[in-house]
Image: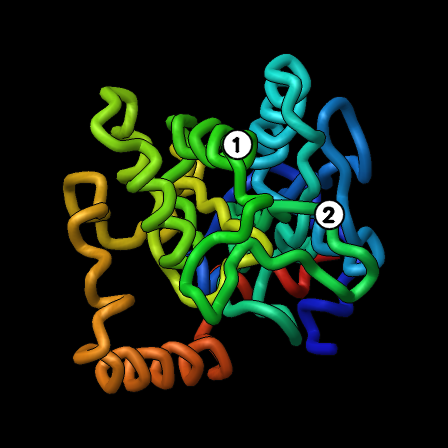
């Protein structure tokens, strides 16, 4: 537990995402219902169902869309804590109410379903067209800034897209460590949140030609070093922006 995880409810009033995705907080957060048309929350006991109202509205809308497209219901993982802020376990980001994890397939208790056959560095057969369609659906939303998936999955999506014209959405799908049993969705800073810190813009293009670093044997040491520094960042306590003190202390 930390002070942010002990708070049980959002602050009242207008919504603002404050600070960065990995060092921020959320004012006036909204809660995603535990179930609705086309979606359900996988682990409600974690109490990480809070987000900027734009994120909550988007998930509800995509639940409806999922149903319309006859895709399986969305299985929602963590959003943010009631007032955002650093979580005692799990991830470094999800702090400002603009991040959400979505499971590829429903977890069974603590057991999750990986989409990656690590030994072969290939996706498993269950990583099928319906899952690719789901990723495309999220990536095609204007509010969505980027998605994170395992590099093996990004590569597979690139290969499957071939030279079809509708592959621009791959631009927002970014390779990252982990993310083999869920994908991570990140929204852009909403217009109502002047203190929200954007990330550096994504490089142009679909990124399919820049995956070599993840698989190249020669980059092995480089990858290990990067992973170590990433893990250190994830483990380090973030310095939150000034506005977050008041958010935490509010009644
Ligand atoms: Zn995440």
Categorize mark 1 by other alpha carbons within 10 Å: few (<14), some (14-19), many (20+). some
Q: Is mark 2 within 8 Å of ligand 1?
A: no
Estimate the x, y position of residue 204 in percent, counting from the top left. 15, 41
Residue at (47% x, 35% y) in the render: 132
- Image quadrant where one finds the C terminus: bottom right
Residue at the spot of label 1: 134
Q: Is mark 1 within 8 Å of ligand 1?
A: no
- Image quadrant where one finds the N terminus: bottom right
Estimate the x, y position of residue 238 in percent, counting from the top left. 46, 76
| Horizontal side, residue 188 vs residue 72: left or right | left
| Horizontal side, residue 197 vs residue 3: left or right | left
Estimate the x, y position of residue 143 in percent, counting from the top left. 42, 31
Q: Which mark is residue 106?
A: 2
Quadrant assignment, res 218: bottom left
Nearest the viewer among 70 and 9 is 70
Mark 1 or mark 2: name the one nearer the start of the chain.
2
Categorize mark 2 by other alpha carbons within 10 Å: few (<14), some (14-19), many (20+). many
Nearest the viewer among 109 and 7 is 109
Residue at (42% x, 46% y) in the render: 147
Q: Is residue 5 above or below residue 69?
A: below
Residue at (54% x, 52% y) in the render: 124
């Amino acid at each position: 537990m930390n002070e942010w995880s002990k708070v049980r409810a959002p602050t009242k009033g207008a919504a603002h995402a404050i600070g960065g995705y990995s060092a921020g907080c959320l004012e006036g957060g909204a809660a995603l219902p535990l179930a609705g048309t086309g979606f359900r929350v996988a682990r409600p006991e974690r109490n990480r169902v809070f987000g900027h109202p734009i994120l909550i509205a988007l998930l509800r809308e995509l639940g409806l869309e999922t149903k319309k497209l006859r895709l399986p219901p969305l299985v929602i993982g963590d959003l943010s804590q009631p007032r955002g802020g650093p979580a005692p376990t799990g991830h470094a980001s999800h702090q400002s109410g603009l991040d959400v994890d979505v499971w590829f397939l429903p977890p069974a208790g603590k057991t999750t379903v990986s989409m990656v056959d690590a030994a072969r560095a290939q996706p498993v057969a269950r990583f099928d067209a319906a899952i690719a369609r789901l990723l495309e659906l999220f990536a095609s939303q204007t509010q969505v800034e980027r998605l994170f998936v395992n590099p093996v999955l990004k590569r597979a999506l690139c290969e499957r897209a071939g030279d079809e014209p509708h592959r621009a959405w791959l631009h927002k799908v970014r390779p990252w460590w982990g993310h083999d049993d869920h994908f991570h969705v990140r929204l852009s800073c909403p217009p109502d949140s002047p203190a929200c810190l954007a990330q550096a813009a994504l490089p142009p293009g679909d990124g399919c030609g820049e995956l070599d670093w993840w698989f190249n044997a020669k980059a092995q040491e480089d990858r290990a070093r990067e992973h170590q520094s990433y893990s250190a960042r994830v483990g380090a306590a973030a310095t939150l922006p000034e506005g977050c003190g008041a958010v935490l202390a509010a009644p």
